[in-house]
Image (spheres, helix red, strand yellow):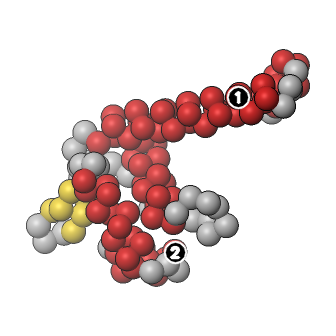
């Protein structure tokens, strides 16, 4: 699984990890029953404190996106793709609405907005 984090963003690192795992599941890159990297492996790969990954994984388990599998580790829970798809859609809907509100506040014309969206 390929995850990238950006420490310059205002979003906490553990939230970035959570979102990227959800997006990977939504896209089908990571499938039901597939094992995810261990805390140690992912923290080493991302060069972050292991507690950051523990926090992200705990949140994903609370949401029942990930689940423990005896002798293996954490795996993607069955039927989690539908929930991740729903959450991904909601995430972008909220961001797009914020974008439109900001465009309206800055008096961006419909033509200018159309050009931006078309790109």
Horizontally, residue 114 falls left or right of residue 21, namely right
Task: Name the residue nearer the viewer: 117 or 76.
Answer: 117
Q: Circle 1 — which element?
A: helix
Q: Using the rendered image of the protein, determine whether residue 99 is visible from the camera's viewpoint.
A: yes
Q: Residue at x 62, y 60 (%)?
A: 10
Q: Is residue 118 left or right of residue 81?
A: right
Give whichever of 50, 40 is nearer the camera.
Answer: 50
The residue that appears at 25% across and 39% down in the rendered structure is 79
Name the element at disc 2.
Answer: helix
**Mark 1 touches mark 2? (CB < 8 Å):** no
Q: Select label 1 or label 2 by which is in front.
A: 1
Q: Nearer the viewer, residue 48 or 69?
A: 48
Residue 101, which numbered label?
1
Residue 48 at x, y = what percent?
Answer: 49, 78
Residue 35 lies in what quarter of the image? bottom left
Looking at the figure, which quarter contains the N terminus?
bottom left
Image location (x, y in percent) of residue 27: 46, 42
**8 up-or-down from 49: above or below:** above
- Residues at marks 1 and 2, CA–CA distance in whole angstroms: 34 Å
Vertical order, 42 against 91 (above or below): below
Identify which residue is drawn at 88% across, 21% down: 109
- Residue 91: assigned label: none
Neighbour tally class for label 1: few under 14, some 14-19, many 20 plus, Cα within 10 Å: few
Q: Is residue 105 above or below residue 12?
A: above
Q: Residues within 10 Å of mark 2 (few under 14, many from 20)?
A: some
User: Which circle's residue, 1 or 2, is located before the other in the chain?
Assistant: 2
Say above or below: 13 vs 104: below
Along the horizontal axis of the image, is 58 left or right of 87? left
Q: Which numbered tag is attached to residue 46?
A: 2
Residue 46 is left or right of residue 108, and the answer is left
Residue 39 location (% of width, % of height): 34, 75
């Amino acid at each position: 699984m390929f995850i990238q984090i950006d420490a310059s963003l205002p979003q906490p690192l553990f939230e970035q990890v959570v979102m990227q795992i959800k997006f990977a599941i939504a896209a089908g890159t990571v499938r039901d029953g597939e094992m995810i990297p261990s805390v140690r492996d992912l923290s080493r790969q991302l060069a972050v404190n292991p507690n950051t990954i523990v926090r992200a994984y705990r949140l994903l388990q609370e949401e029942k996106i990930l689940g423990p599998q005896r002798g293996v580790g954490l795996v993607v829970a069955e039927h989690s793709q539908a929930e991740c798809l729903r959450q991904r859609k909601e995430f972008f809907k909220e961001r797009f609405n914020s974008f439109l509100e900001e465009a309206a506040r800055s008096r961006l014309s419909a033509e200018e907005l159309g050009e931006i969206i078309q790109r």
